[in-house]
Image: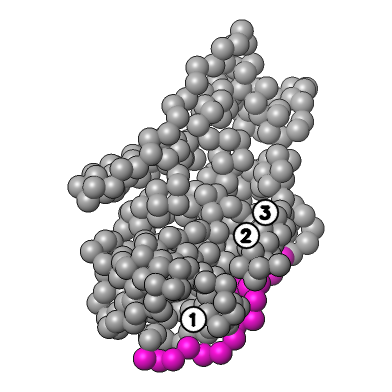
Amino acid sequence: MNAYWLIILTLLVSNATNAQQYLSAREQHIVTISSFTAKGDLPSLKNALGAGLDSGLTINEIKEVLVHLYAYTGFPRSLQGINTFLTVLDERKAKGITDKVGQTASPVNDSLSRYERGKKVLESLTGRKETGPKTGYAAFSPEIEVFLKEHLFADLFTRDILSYSDREIATIAALINLGGVEPMMQSHMRIALNIGINQSKLTHLISIIQNEVGPYEANAANKVLATITGKATALKSNDTTSLFSRGSKAPAERFTGIVWVNMLVEQKDGFGHTAGTVTFEPGARTNWHKHPGGQVLLVTTGKGYYQEKGSSIKTIYKGDVVKCPPGIEHWHGASPDTEMSHVAISSNMDKGPVIWLQKVTDEQYKSLK
């Protein structure tokens, strides 16, 4: 079998397995957007919103996440998130970036009252029928129980722009970052498990928060998950499990920081392309460089950055695919606190090898604008 296709087949098989263990790239962006919205960390949210758009989330999907979150974080956090999103869209439009708008919500057509529709949605989420007298908050404050059924579950959850799974991922991420709401976090983690978001994916969600926000929030969430499942799961910092070995240290004249390269397909093999894994320790990156025949990066672990000459830095995550056009100067590497690995495939090698250029300065690396 052609070595190139062997690599792709290996990745596809691995991705099929990882799909059961990890959130998709799209879902990971929902986690970061929800986390920074709940925190009120607008600079980080701005970067997360841009990264979400770059990964393929539509304008309406992101807007729906921010609208959904008002039910959990309150109007102030939600509106701040929406205003930040407007700024991001205006800036991207000024740069000539056209983002996909996406679908709008379909009208709800059924004969049920809003209360009954909300009750039906909640029963579907929890997997339990609501029977018997009201207890707890529902008995003490029956009006808020009605609001929950009629608005949260009837009005919001039935909007089909996001799936139930998307909404629960957004909700859990927000609750983790709010803090002090462990009973609600536990309820929504149980809902997630009921609708098919397994323990491995919830652990991945928490690991993303550990890497992006901090260990305090992640550890609190992990304790709640352990209470539900009866089994504590160790969080893997920075999600550095890789398909391939690290290989050898890369030459310092072409990289900043510690970088490891494992060539899987070399030019001498005669396939017309090269392929290898590149692992960047936190803060490490390539020099500016360009490929006469173009290059594709398949991000396999962690979080990193990619930038083309004259464009802003893009944040990339595990599961993202980066297409580097032929002859365009660019660089890529890990974020300051997270290791990142990718498979780099350089094609059309008959057009010439990679052309290495100047170092990426610390000022350029830190200019996340």
Q: Which residue is mark 3?
A: 19
Residue 204, label in figure: 2
Viewer-nearest of labels 2 and 3? 3
Mostly what secondary structure, the magenta segment?
Answer: loop
Residue 190: within the magenta?
no
Q: Which residues are magenta?
A: 233-253
In the rendered image, residue 241, in percent from the top left (x then y), is placed at 64, 72
- Mark positioned earlier in the residue sequence (1 or 2): 2
Residue most extreme to the left: 94
Determine crowd level at label 1: few under 14, some 14-19, many 20+ residues with C-alpha closer than 10 A: many
Whether residue 178 appears in this view of the structure is no
For marks 2 and 3, give the CA distance. Answer: 11 Å
Residue 281, label in figure: 1
Left or right, residue 122 beside residue 301: right
Residue 247: within the magenta?
yes
Circle 2 sits in a helix, a strand or a loop, which is it?
helix
Q: Are marks 1 and 2 in contact (CB under 8 Å)?
A: no
Whether residue 260 appears in this view of the structure is yes
For marks 1 and 3, give the CA distance. Answer: 25 Å
In the rendered image, residue 311, in percent from the top left (x then y), is placed at 26, 61
